Amino acid sequence: MKVFAAINLVRRRMSSTRWLACMLIVLVLAGCSGKNPHQLIVGMELSSPPFDMTDEHNQPTGIDVELAHALGDALGREMVIRNTSFEGLIPALQTGKIDLILSSMTITAQRAESIDFSDAYLHVGICLLVNAGSDVRRADDLNRPGRKVVVKNNTTGYFYAQEHLPNAELLQITEPGACVLEVVQGKADAFIYDQFSVFQYQRQNPKTTRAVLEPLRKENWGIGVRKGNAELLRQVNAFLADFRARKGLETIAGKYLAADRQAFEAMGNPFSF
């Protein structure tokens, strides 16, 4: 009661305009400090099965989603998955809209200038999804005039094509599904993307595409943490080391990637966690 009396006293001594301005400031400050300390907001682009996707009820699912929840259990914090475009993930982390990036993101020197990365949780590579009617057998076949290569913006496939395929025409598209459609319809000779996704897309389009799974180069995926958040980075790395030792990543992968692993090992291109 004394608090309300004090507020009313202040209100009587102030003009209505000044009173409203003060109340707005209080509300803004309350909003800024209202973040739930028991939650971690994880940014993902939910369009890259089997790692980042949604189920039939439009709920997040996949390897990265399960890994995020396992991390939350280890840290005693609730993980909130926020669907974010791949291009928007790093800006969202830098501005505090999310706390972590866990979205099949390759560790690169360029990205490490803007954010910190955890230790790698997956070792994989990028490769080619090729139109079934194309005579392309390897990346070198694409580096000549008349070839069309589709890439997803700001991915390592995009940067690889810029560096190694200067003679090809690059088609830059935001959505991976749209990239696949370009290959399916014969509008592009190939799509450069990670091995897991290429394998899945080829299985979905067996008559119109071929998967050239030989890696163009090998890469490591990591969890992104905001610069300066050393304690959270330490916790993430400690979790990954323990989870790997307990074969946790192998268990999750077994639910989604059993067929992929057999195919890759048969070709002499095994992947590892």
Image (cartoon, rainbow, N blue to C red):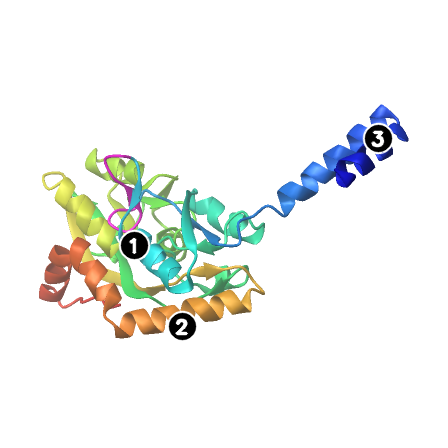
Q: Check the picture and name the quadrant holding the N terminus.
A: top right
Q: Tell me if residue 267 comes above or below residue 37 in the rendering.
A: below
Q: Amino acid at mark 3?
A: Arg
Q: Amino acid at mark 1?
A: Glu
* SS class, disc 3: helix
Check the image and name the residue furthest to the top: 16
The image position of residue 214, as x and y in percent, is 20, 61
Q: CA distance from mark 1 to mark 3?
A: 51 Å
Q: Residue at x 84, y 26 (%)?
A: 17
Residue segment shown in magenta: 48-57
Q: Amino acid at mark 2?
A: Ala
Q: Is residue 56 left or right of residue 84?
A: left
Residue 5's quadrant in the figure?
top right
Q: Tell me if residue 67 comes above or below residue 15 in the rendering.
A: below
Residue under label 1? 66
Category of crowding for the residue at label 2, using alpha-carbon neighbours closer than 10 angstroms: few (below 14), some (14–19), many (at least 20): some
* SS class, disc 2: helix
Kindly tell me whether residue 148 is visible in this rendering.
Answer: no
> Upstream in the sequence, badge 1 or badge 3?
3
Q: Tell me if residue 149 comes above or below residue 109 in the rendering.
A: above
Q: Main secondary structure of the magenta part?
A: loop
From the viewer's side, name the closer residue of 5 and 25: 5
What label does residue 238 carry, if any?
2
Kindly tell me whether residue 150 is visible in this rendering.
Answer: yes
Residue under label 3? 11
Q: CA distance from mark 1 to mark 2?
A: 17 Å
> Upstream in the sequence, badge 1 or badge 2?
1
